[in-house]
């Protein structure tokens, strides 16, 4: 049986959902990327690493995907990255995402870490979501 990798579809759906929210896009001036630009304006969001773990069995085409979303800011206080992180969490946690290749069974926040980067200037939120998909659930 073949395996349907949901990563590309999940990334596209997550980006579309984040971009569609007027409150979030106003907070970050629409800056959503797959990596931090060379000379970025802050704050910004990047949709980072994905780890796909197939859930294979007879007749099952499912996966658990860990998705990491980063919030970057150089505001003097960490509150801005927490506010943007909170907006991202509210948009994705326990919400349904419909992809082209798979039905989404659940989207759950696994962890949220708020850090100051070693440069002493950049605040960094790391949000990890666990997304269960099933290609047979379409």
Image: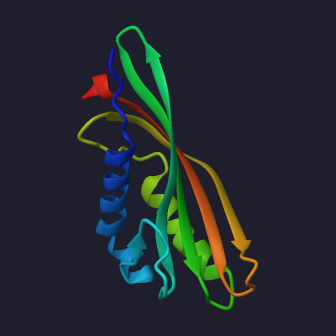
Q: Position of residue 84 (x, y in %)?
A: 52, 73
Q: How is the image coloured?
A: rainbow
Lateral position of residue 41 relative to residue 136, left or right: right
Q: Position of residue 77 (x, y in %)?
A: 69, 87
Residue shown at the point (37%, 76%) measured from the top left: 25
**Quarter of the figure that contains the N terminus:** top left
Residue shown at the point (70%, 87%) measured from the top left: 121
48 versus 25 height, above or below = above
Q: Position of residue 104 (x, y in %)?
A: 37, 36
86 or 66, nearer to the observer: 66
In this figure, what is the number of numbered marks? 0
Residue shown at the point (48%, 71%) measured from the top left: 45
33 or 115, nearer to the observer: 33
In the rendered image, the residue lying farthest to the top is: 58
Residue shown at the point (62%, 89%) measured from the top left: 75
Q: Position of residue 123 (x, y in %)?
A: 66, 78
Lateral position of residue 79 relative to residue 14, left or right: right
**Quarter of the figure that contains the C terminus:** top left
35 versus 90 height, above or below = below
In the rendered image, the residue lying farthest to the front is: 38
Residue 116, image quadrant: bottom right
């Amino acid at each position: 049986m073949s395996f349907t990798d949901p990563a590309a579809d999940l990334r596209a759906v997550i980006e579309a959902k984040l971009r569609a929210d007027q409150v979030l896009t106003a907070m970050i001036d629409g800056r959503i990327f797959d990596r931090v630009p060379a000379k970025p304006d802050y704050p910004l969001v990047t949709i980072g690493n994905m780890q796909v773990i197939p859930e294979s069995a007879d007749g099952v085409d499912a996966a658990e995907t860990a998705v990491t979303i980063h919030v970057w800011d150089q505001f003097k206080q960490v509150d801005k990255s927490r506010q943007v992180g909170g907006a991202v969490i509210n948009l994705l946690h326990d919400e349904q995402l419909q992809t082209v290749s798979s039905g989404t069974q659940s989207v759950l926040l696994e962890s949220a870490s708020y850090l100051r980067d070693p440069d002493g200037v950049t605040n960094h939120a790391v949000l990890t979501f666990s997304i269960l998909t099933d290609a047979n659930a379409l």
